Amino acid sequence: MNIFKSHFWYNKSQRNGIFILVLLIIIVQIFIFVDVFTDNEIINTNNPELVAFQNQIDSLKAIEIENRKPKVYPFNPNYITDYKGEQLGMSLEEIDRLLVFRKTNKFINSKEEFQNITKVSDSLLNKISPYFKFPDWVVKQNQSSNSSRNSKESFTENSYKKKEVKISTTDINKATAEDFQSISGIGSAFSNRIIKYRSKLQGFSFDDQLYEVWGLDKEIADKVLSVFKIDEKPIIKKVNINTIEFKQLLKNPYVDYELCKKIFNYRDEVAELQNISELKHIEGFPVELYDRIVLYLEAK
């Protein structure tokens, strides 16, 4: 018992000190409690400085949201895929109309024609058409006068009649402008256009590539193919997909900016393509154009 008394026995001055300490602790606790629960200061939300600060915060939020949106780069609307169309805001019906049209081996060459085929709204057309990228010769053709367009539309069957002309060859890759003009419906403009597109392709490798010539009606193209065939396929120098540069790949007649970017992103991911067929693994790759795209590419 003496041991416990030595620990718990206090004299009068010690007891007074403990009492005062406890009293101070209680007073401090009461002060803190009252201060917290009686702080009823009302903030004026209509304060001009506060409103200006909130507007600045909202503006920064809007800028950040805009920066997070996926950027749209120039693209050829003829090669819009399901994934790309959905990103642009097109409905499935509008995308399907475009794909059905492209299966006829025809090409869209203006934003007006794009709207006529897909039936997209004016607001969506105005939103995405600034990013349309057509070949240079298409742009020049679209800038031609209305009179030239009207003269094209006013063609009649009588305009297609030609005198029989001897041709120098039946090989479509060797035929001259004069050879093509022996076909009813082919004048100097179309014959030169065929030859120009043939040069861009480095020669026709497939008969149906003729349908890709801008403005050439299928009926007239069929007449050309009834006379001219591919006797000898062109020799196209292929470029290594693993070393090709971005601008060089864009020269591929079937690769637009968007597809070029996807190919380079995929190449960065895999480090090196072991086989050119790996291009089909790229999300959104136009498989229907694979045979044409790989005419100019190889994997080494």
Image: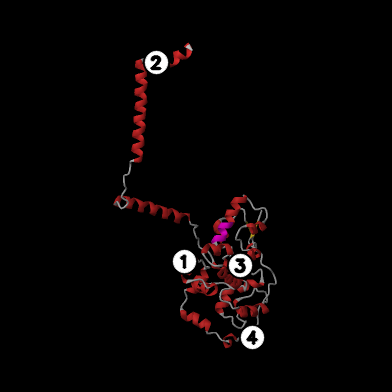
Does dot 2 land on a helix, a strand or a loop?
loop
Instruction: Compute the Cα span from label 3 to label 1.
Output: 32 Å
Residue 127, label in figure? 1
Which residue is depicted at the point 35% across and 40% down? 37
Q: How is the image coloured?
A: secondary structure
| Residue identified by numbered label 4 | 164
**Residue type highlighted by circle 1:** Lys
Q: Is residue 115 visible?
A: yes
| Labels 2 and 3: the sequence-earlier one | 2
Left or right for 41, reference 65: left
| Labels 2 and 1: the sequence-earlier one | 2
Task: Tell me the magenta residue range.
Answer: 257-262
**Other residues around mark 1 within 10 Å, as few (<14) / some (14–19) / many (≥20):** few
- Whole-percent x and y of residue 154? 52, 85
Residue 261 magenta-highlighted: yes
Q: Are marks 3 and 4 in contact (CB under 8 Å)?
A: no
Residue 201, label in figure? 3
Which residue is depicted at the point 36% across and 24% down? 21
Residue 156 magenta-highlighted: no
- Whole-percent x and y of residue 171? 67, 74
**Residue type highlighted by circle 4:** Glu
